[in-house]
Image (tube, rainbow, N blue to C red):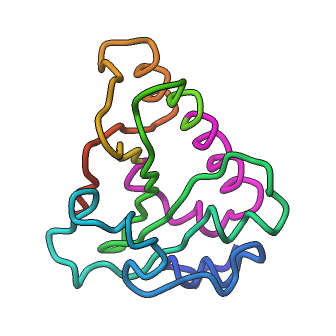
Amino acid sequence: MNDQVKHLEDAVQSTPEVNGCFKKGLQALLRRDRAESLISCDDPKKIQGSIYLDQATKEYRHPFDNRWDYAIECDNKIYYYEPHPASGGDKVKEVSGKADWLLWWLKNKAPEIKALGTAGLYWVHTGKSDIDKNSQQYKRLTVKGVQLKSKLNMK
């Protein structure tokens, strides 16, 4: 691994599947996914950049996988952000699969991004959530490190 990689932008440039996909601030996020109702930062100037992982990796070798949506660097911490409905159907299974893919991808295809560490994997539910925090489904998420939130608050 390159000892000079210290930020998401550098790590993205060193990762063939996503090279060239880093964007300053929250520019990589779709407009609906950067809504203030879903995401915020105590000091927006600390948001260094983002990558739309789902889109960047879709064409490369993962067109049929359930892919995690975003990585965001804020104040030198990497937040993995998945805005997704949390009601109806088996949304836990879907997002759990996305988390599995992300962890596999970081280990096998993006070790320099993985080396940056993480501030967490955040599933931010769009709309109402019908997932009980005492349920087995919820516990399955937490075992994988996924935090179900109504909003991603980056510090």
Give yes or no for residue 111 being in the magenta stretch. Answer: yes
Q: Position of residue 87 (x, y in %)?
A: 40, 29
Q: Residue at x 14, y 69 (%)?
A: 42
Q: Position of residue 49 (x, y in %)?
A: 42, 80
Magenta range is 96-121
On-image quarter of the N terminus: bottom right
Q: Residue at x 45, y 46 (%)?
A: 84
Q: Position of residue 68 (x, y in %)?
A: 58, 53
Q: Residue at x 62, y 82 (%)?
A: 21
Q: Position of residue 130 (x, y in %)?
A: 33, 24
Give yes or no for residue 25 being in the magenta stretch. Answer: no
On-image quarter of the C terminus: bottom left
Q: Is residue 57 left or right of residue 134?
A: right
In the rendered image, the vertical position of residue 54 relative to residue 89, given as above or below: below
Q: Residue at x 70, y 53 (%)?
A: 107
Q: Quadrant of residue 101?
A: top right
Q: Is residue 12 left or right of residue 105?
A: left
Q: Of residues 116 and 66, which is closer to you in this image?
A: 66
Type of secondary structure dominating the magenta stretch: helix
Q: Quadrant of residue 139?
A: top left
Residue furthest left as drawn: 42
Q: Of residues 92 and 43, which is closer to you in this image?
A: 92
